[in-house]
Image (tube, grey):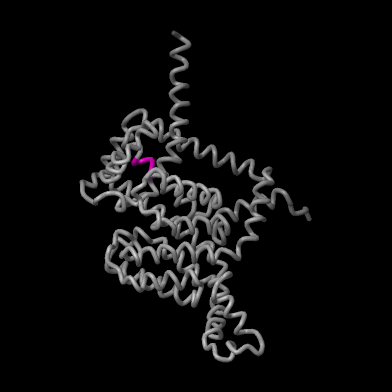
Amino acid sequence: MGNSSARSPVASTLGAVLSLAALAVIATDSATAHIDYVTDGAGETGDPIAFAVEVLSQPENALLFGGTGLLGGVALLGYLWVRPTIPDIDVLRATLSEYRDLVPWMLRLSMGLPLIGAGFAGYYFSPAVETAPRLLMIGLGFFLLFGLATRFVAAVGLVAYLVGLASDLRLLLSMEYVPGLLAIVLLGGGRPSADHMLGAVANAEGTLYGRVDPFHRLGHWFAERVAPFARYAPSVIRVGLGVTFVYLGLVEKILQPGRALQVVEQYDLTAIVPVDPGAWVLGAGLAEIALGVLLIGGLLTRGVAAAAFVVFTLTMFGLPDDPVLAHVTMFGLASAVFTLGSGPLALDNFVTDAEHRTNHPTPAD
């Protein structure tokens, strides 16, 4: 009896840690779904403060969330401690640097395909806004896919989104278009693209197209003006994706627990991880906010982007009613962040600098 009672707290703690590990992955899977896309919008949103207090007042939930915070903090400190001894990360970083020139193509695909889908389906950027100028959406999408007049088309798309947002705040559900399109304006079409091919022909000596093309000089002039800011494209994508995560976690889950509980019940998510439905909702929202904060701060950037990509993939299988095409933009941004890394103005840079100073100390005078 004595041994049994002694093991009980340990077993409970171990069970909580295992549950929270699963919840961190699968509950975030629920978090990445847009609630407006998988519910009919009916029902009470609920009082978020009372909901959180009620969830955390249950001992097993308090242990679950407390263990999550403790485990996350220990894991972060442990990674920062052992990071300099893992050469695999340096090799991965060097390999990814070879893919940087493909990022514009990656962004064009991830923005262009959903825009074409939006045009044919009849919605305006977000499935929540069901009326749309179809030709505009389809035109923007195809021009981005082809990479023709890329910077101009991306700027038009960005303006079209912001104009729509001014009249319908539901477009905030697709706010990832802002960093994606802005990054395309900064980086251009890249290669392969129609711009790249036509530019090569136009700039070649003696070509017929070079004599009649009125646009390549203007495009070159604009590219030169934008070039000093292109280095901030990774930061734009990273922060934009992070803000999207925080918004969806806070506004769609934490502040609307009643509707989030509908999703848990609708898809029987407690059968996947047997925890309290309230813990599902609160955990999903907090997990998404945590991912967003890490991205905004630029800490563990590539790891967070990789986790986000896995979560988006799980969402397609866990929530079959969630429109996959509407999430292609998120796939693209996460892939771009994973490829480019944190960019300027990120905490990862301080970590890297500290490692460099540790491994290559300055000789004393």
Asked if 7 appears above or below 42 in the picture, the reply is: above
Q: Main secondary structure of the magenta part?
A: helix
Q: Which residues are magenta?
A: 281-286
- Count the marks: 0
Asked if 364 appears above or below 51 in the picture, the reply is: below
Where's residue 32, x and y in %? 40, 49
Where's residue 199, x and y in %? 59, 80
Residue 97: quadrant of the picture: bottom right
Asked if 38 appears above or below 148 in the picture, the reply is: above
In the image, farthest residue toward the top: 1
- Quick check: is 100 in the magenta stretch? no
Residue at the spot x=61%, y=51% of the render?
A: 351
Residue at the spot x=47%, y=17% of the render?
A: 7
Asked if 167 appears above or below 212 in the picture, the reply is: above
Tell which of 212 and 259 is nearer to you. 212
Where's residue 3, x and y in %? 48, 11
Where's residue 46, x and y in %? 23, 44
Whether residue 113 sits left or right of residue 81 in the image: it is: left
Residue at the spot x=68%, y=51% of the render?
A: 91
Residue 83: quadrant of the picture: top right
Q: Quadrant of the N terminus?
A: top left
Whether residue 346 sits left or right of residue 322 in the image: it is: right
Tell which of 194 and 296 is nearer to you. 194
Q: Quadrant of the C terminus?
A: bottom right
Tell which of 323 and 245 is nearer to you. 323
Residue 56: quadrant of the picture: top left
In the image, farthest residue toward the left: 43
Whether residue 122 sits left or right of residue 329 in the image: it is: left
